[in-house]
Amino acid sequence: MKLISYQHDNAVRYGVLLGNNVVDMRHCMNDAPASINDFVALASSQAGLMASIAARAASAAVLPLARVQLLPCIPRPSKIICLGVNYHDHAAEGGNTVADYPTIFFRGPSSLAAHGDAIPIPAISTSLDYEAELALVIGKTARQVPEADALKHVFAYACFNDATFRDYQRKTTQWTVGKNFDQTGGFGPHLVTADELPPGCVGLHIESRLNGRVMQSASTTDMVFHVAPTIAMMSACMTLEPGDVIVMGTPAGVGYARKPPVWMVHGDVIEIDIEGIGVLRNTIANEAVATAA
């Protein structure tokens, strides 16, 4: 099943995506939770609920997708945990050593962007890079989960663009600032529930295209730390809650590693394409232009 978050009639909604239409979740179940985070928790705990929702959505009233404003798949996650240097080829291109524990950093909700949004470039930087990544959404609360049970805690997957201002990333030993400019982390185009994808999304093709030119092309098999061990390691340290997002790192081909470096500029179109999930597309715009739009 594909799910989206969106705004319509000045209200934040979520629902089932059916082609070019959306069915409001309120039409698919009785007493639908107000937030998608609460829905994720409920759907992950009640066997058969998703099948019931799919059946009701098939005959429910639809709203054309063109009439809604898409939001990031989970608009306000309590945590966005990101992995750095998590593909063997990306580690090699950056001269990094593969470690025995993942490099972890956080993003905040204000850094997220929906499918179709413009990613703004502020006047203070011109070194905006792209990063094609797989994102997962936690469905069941996870604390000290063994690796063998970890995938039971995943609700869905999506595409992510961990767009980064490289100069600000390298201003300090921590990457936080360069990874948290407003509306830079593309998250979409929709959620695909875990039952529709291979366990842990192993073996999927992942690609980025800048203005139609392939920049990154790899398989998720090349990850250093896959989904299950990542959940196990993170849940050993912190409670993962329904609606939390984990972003699984990027393969080789990023802009900073090219000679000369390739930075995204005003008017560019960046696409993140993951097999079985979809294509996340964002334009790049100078901040003044993006704000005016």
Image: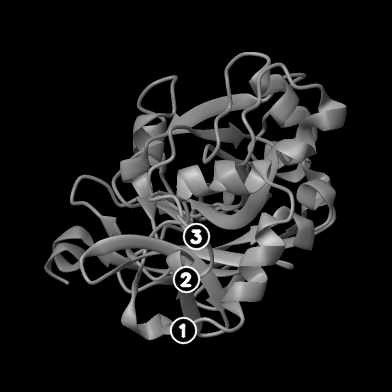
* Distance between mark 1 and mark 3 Cα atoms: 15 Å
Amino acid residing under circle 2: His
Which of the image's four quarters has the N terminus?
Answer: bottom right
Amino acid residing under circle 1: Ala
Which residue position is annotated with label 2?
A: 27
Which residue position is annotated with label 1?
A: 61
Do residues under tags 1 and 3 come within 8 Å of each other at their CB atoms?
no
Indicate the secondary structure of the residue bearing disc 3: loop
x and y percentages locating residue 141 in the rendered image:
62, 29
Q: Residue at x 61, y 25 (%)?
A: 103
Q: Residues within 10 Å of mark 3 (few under 14, many from 20)?
A: few
Judge whether residue 112 can be spotted in this image.
Answer: yes
Q: Is residue 73 left or right of residue 55?
A: left
Amino acid residing under circle 3: Asn
Which numbered tag is attached to residue 30? 3
Image quadrant of residue 245?
top right
Answer above or below: position of 206 versus 24. Answer: above
Q: Residues within 10 Å of mark 2 (few under 14, many from 20)?
A: some
x and y percentages locating residue 154 in the rendered image:
69, 42
* Distance between mark 2 and mark 1 Cα atoms: 8 Å
x and y percentages locating residue 199 in the rendered image:
83, 49
